Image (tube, grey):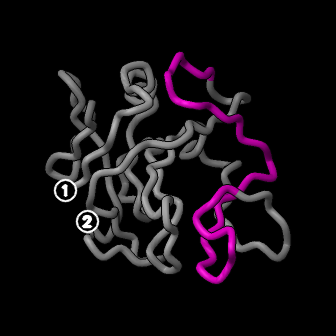
Amino acid sequence: MIIKLKNKDKLLIDEFEFECCIGKGGLSKNKKEGDKCTPKGIYTLGKVYYRPDRVRMPKTNLIKKKISKNYGWCDDPHNSKYNKEVKLKNKVKAEKLFRKDASYDIFIVINYNKNKIKAFKGSAIFLHLTKNYKPTNGCIAIKKKDMMILLKIIQKKTKIYIN
């Protein structure tokens, strides 16, 4: 099963089509940390992170993880935890996962730069929520109702094709 990004504003899977938004910098084959581009390629999907105080987790075949207040995602290319989930500490530069806005109430990790992590190649690429389809910092974002449908139909072996 493949999720396909079509025309930079549609995600397709089976007979479903979801409106989406991508990075402000568009699509890139040469993603770099902070360029606001969504990386081109075919990627597996990682865990589903969610805020149990805000969303009820739907049934899904993906591994689920509750977001705690001290969770972050390291975006410091000089840190050994680069592009990994971290506990927030003063010395770790990381994107906060427990946010005031709803963007990360539920999200799926896109396994970009995950197998052999390369510094400065980009971090924290997620399929997360949006309310208004404003461009992201490199992620792909969809509405909450669409995320709930998507989570029910994707499998552990589902890949996302970004081209």
Mark 2 in CB contact with mark 1 (< 8 angstroms)? yes
Q: Decide whether the magenta segment is chiefly helix, strand or loop.
A: loop
The spot of residue 129 in percent (x, y) is 47, 41
Report the front residue among 91 and 82: 82
Tell whether 145 sits left or right of 159.
Answer: right
Residue lying furthest front in this view? 116
Q: Secondary structure at mark 1?
A: loop
**Residue at coordinates 37% horizontally, 50% vertically from top-left?**
140
**Residue at coordinates 49% horizontally, 80% vertically from top-left?**
120
Quadrant in which the N terminus appears: top left
The spot of residue 151 in percent (x, y) is 44, 26
Would you name the residue on which mark 1 appears? 163
Label 2 neighbourhood size at 10 Å, few (<14), some (14-19), many (20+)?
Answer: some
Q: Secondary structure at mark 2?
A: strand
The spot of residue 76 in percent (x, y) is 63, 77
Q: Is residue 5 magenta?
A: no
Label 1 neighbourhood size at 10 Å, few (<14), some (14-19), many (20+)?
Answer: some
Spatial separation of the CA atoms under disc 2 and disc 1: 7 Å
The spot of residue 81 in percent (x, y) is 68, 68
Q: Amino acid at mark 2?
A: Leu
Residue lying furthest left in this view? 7
Total numbered badges shown on the rendered structure: 2
Q: Amino acid at mark 1?
A: Asn
Q: Reply above or below: 71 against 52.
A: below
Would you name the residue on which mark 2 appears? 27
Q: Is residue 66 magenta?
A: yes
Residue 130 in view of the camera: no
Magenta residues (range):
56-85
Quadrant in which the C terminus appears: bottom left
- Circle nearer the N terminus (2, 1): 2
